[in-house]
Image: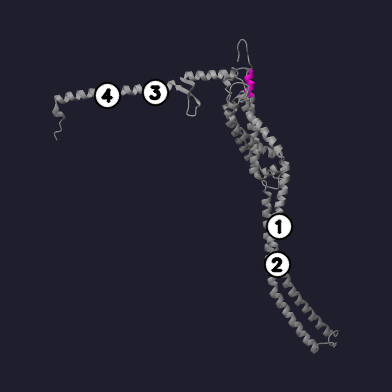
Amino acid sequence: MENSFYQSPKPSFLMKQLWKACGADSYILERSTYTDHVKYACLGGIVVATGFMAAMAGGYAFYVIFGPRGSGAVNMPIDYVAISLSIVFGFIWGLIIFNIDRFIVASTGKGDGTEAITFDEIKSALPRMLMGIIIAFTISKPMELKMFSTEIDVELVNRQQAQKIEFTEGINADFDPKISELREEIAELRSVIKEKEKEKISAELSYSLEIDGDGGTGNRGFGPVAREKDSTRQRIMREFENLKNELKPRINDFQDEIDELKKEQKLLISEKGDISNKLNGLSERINILHEIVDPLLTLFITLLFMTIELTPIFFKMMLIKSPYDFMNDNLKALIQAEHGIEVQYDFYKDKDGLKRDLVVNHQSEKLIKEKIKLIQTQSELSDFIIDKWKGEEMIKIEKKPDDYIDKA
């Protein structure tokens, strides 16, 4: 604004953008005082800051959703796809919150135009305040997760390890008895072979001592006793070979079954370990946050964001009317007058006893009247033309009736 008694500084490009952020009319503000310039630039700055914080919070939340699953956040690989998706969705989320905040601030009126906040002003602003509280919660929770990410990661690792142990113990409880049973079967079969082998060794030793004369009859050479012991030795050797040939395949089958069970057991433990490592989603992090962090601290952070979110609403209710507001009201009145709109305030009461305004649209009423008059005139002209034509046709019929008689 510039005149003989006052000149306000020319607003910068940044200030104009902040005006737009809070939904203020830059045309009017440029012609208003510098106080109004600063006032609405500050309101716009709060809206922009809220959108920026929402973008960061949303980006982190989306990274937790899209990011790699692993043991906490220790030595985690960089997932560039997840980072890209988080940036894109975080930016979109920030724009959504920015647009909602802009609507809330722009649609909040001046109340009664005084610094005092009355009950009626709070009641009228309650829906916007509820929206602001919801937005504050959506922004504060991801920010809390980021603030306490170190403590959450440590607890996540502990829970993942505990989950791995639980999974491993459950799998071992299923497989170990089967493996032990098979091992007992193998041990029993090997014991039978071992006993037969001892019998074979004993028969060979008895035969050898008899031949050497160091045992048995004490006669050296292949005598009748030695021949009998040789026959017994050969019989026991055949029985041993037959028993070994019979039991070895069964032992191998049991061992193969053990190896297969161990392989399956190891695979299941590995799969359950991967599942345990993925136990770091958004819901689990929020649960840990509520368990390890003092509720008063999280409440303080939430209240901080709630204050930032609701400050513009309360500020607008506390603002006294300034030149900007009067010029804005004047411009609205001029536009209404230009378009033939008349508002009669508190003109009638509805069925609930609330006072309502009567809005009279003079231009539309004028257009409706013109259209009605035009249609009535066209109808009268049509009637006149039809009557005129009817009279002329009747004269023609009287002069030459034969021309109008069907002679077929």
Q: Amino acid at mark 4?
A: Asp
| Disc 1 secondary structure class | helix
The residue singled out by tag 3 in the image is: 368
The residue singled out by tag 2 in the image is: 181
- Of discs 2 and 3, which sits in the foreground? 3
Q: Amino acid at mark 3?
A: Ile
The residue singled out by tag 1 in the image is: 169
Disc 2 from disc 4: Cα separation: 111 Å
The structure residue drawn at horizontal position 66% and vertical position 31%, both measured from the top left corner, is 307
Q: Magenta segment: does it hold 38? A: yes
- 333 or 40: nearer the viewer: 333
* Extent of the magenta region: 34-41
Whether label 4 touches label 1, CB < 8 Å: no
- 224 or 178: nearer the viewer: 178
**Mark number for residue 383?**
4
| Disc 3 secondary structure class | helix
Whether label 2 touches label 4, CB < 8 Å: no
